[in-house]
Amino acid sequence: TLSNLLGLSSGLVVFAGPACSGKPTSATSYVSALCESKMLRACFLNSSDEFPIRAGDSLILANSSGTVPDKMAQALRCGCDLFWMGDFDGEDLLPMLRAAESGAIVVCCITAGNSVGAIEALLSGVSLENRALARTMLAAALKAVVVQRLLPGAAEGAGAMPAWEILYNTQNVASFIRNGDHFKLPSVIAASASEGMLLMDDCLAELVRGGYVSREEAGKYVSNVARFG
C-alpha cells in the first residue's frame, strides 16, 4: 500500500488508528520514503520529532513563523510540494485541503478506529457554515485513508501484529463524502478489493485464518460478525 502511495504527486493522505497503534511510525516511514524517492521541497509542521524523517536529497523549509495556516501559506509561496502535519488539529482541515488542491502532498495522522471515523474526525472541527465546502474539497483532495491497529500475536513471543483498513478515494467514495453518506464506505471498501482496498474485518479474518492472531483478540475489533465468520 505504501509503495502504491509513493506515486502520488498531490492530495491528502491520512494515517488513522486508535492510540498506541503505531500510526505515526507508518506515517513518518511514508514521508521518509517520499523524501528519499525524489527531490521534494518539504515543510514539516509536526510539533514532535519522536520519529525522525530521513530527508534524502529533499529540501526542508525551516524558520517559518505564525500559525499553522500562516506557515502553510509561506511554504506554498516558496513552492513546497510536501507537508507533514503530524497529529491532525481540527482547525487545520481547510488549509490542508487548499494545499492539496494547489498540487502538494499533505500527510497527517488522526485518532480513529476505521475509515468512517477518520472522515468524520477530519470534518468535526469545521464550522457548520463551512461544512459543505469542506466536504466538497475533501471529496476532491483525499487520496487515501490507511487505518492501522496492533494486536497481540497468537504465537508465544510473536509481539504485536498489525491489522489494516485501506480506503482509496474512488468516484463512489468521493460521492459519499460529498453527500455525507459516510456509513456507506465500508460496503464500498468490501467490494473494492481488486482496486487495492481492504476492510478491517477482512484483514482480521485473514490474520485469524493464518494463525497470526487469536480469534478472541480479533473478535474485539470486528464490526460485522458475519464477515468475520
Image (spheres, grey):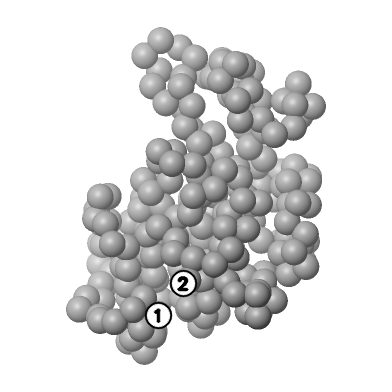
Find out whether the residues at labels 1 and 2 contact each other: C-beta distance under 8 Å: yes
Per the model, the C-alpha gap separating discs 1 and 2 is 7 Å
Vertical side of 20 occupied by 210: above or below: above
- Residue 9 seen in this snapshot: no
**x, y (%) of residue 112?**
54, 48
Vertical side of 144 occupied by 21: above or below: above
- Counting the numbered discs, the total is 2
Q: Quadrant of the rendered structure where residue 136 is?
A: bottom right
Disc 2 residue type (three-letter): Asp
- Seen at 60% across and 25% down, the residue is 220
In this orientation, which residue lies closer to the viewer: 220 or 176? 220
**x, y (%) of residue 85?**
39, 65
Disc 1 residue type (three-letter): Pro
With 130 as the anchor, is 45 left or right in this view? left
**x, y (%) of residue 142?**
59, 66
- Seen at 63% across and 23% down, the residue is 219
- Seen at 48% across and 54% down, the residue is 110
Q: Which residue is mark 2?
A: 92
- The kind of secondary structure element at disc 1 is helix
Instruction: Name the residue at the left extreme.
Output: 63
Instruction: Name the residue at the bottom extreme.
Output: 77
With 114 as the anchor, is 93 left or right in this view? left
In this orientation, which residue lies closer to the viewer: 148 or 47? 47
- Residue 41 seen in this snapshot: yes
**Dot placed on the residue nearer the N-terminal end, 1 or 2:** 1
Q: Which residue is mark 1?
A: 69
Quadrant in which the C terminus is drawn: top right
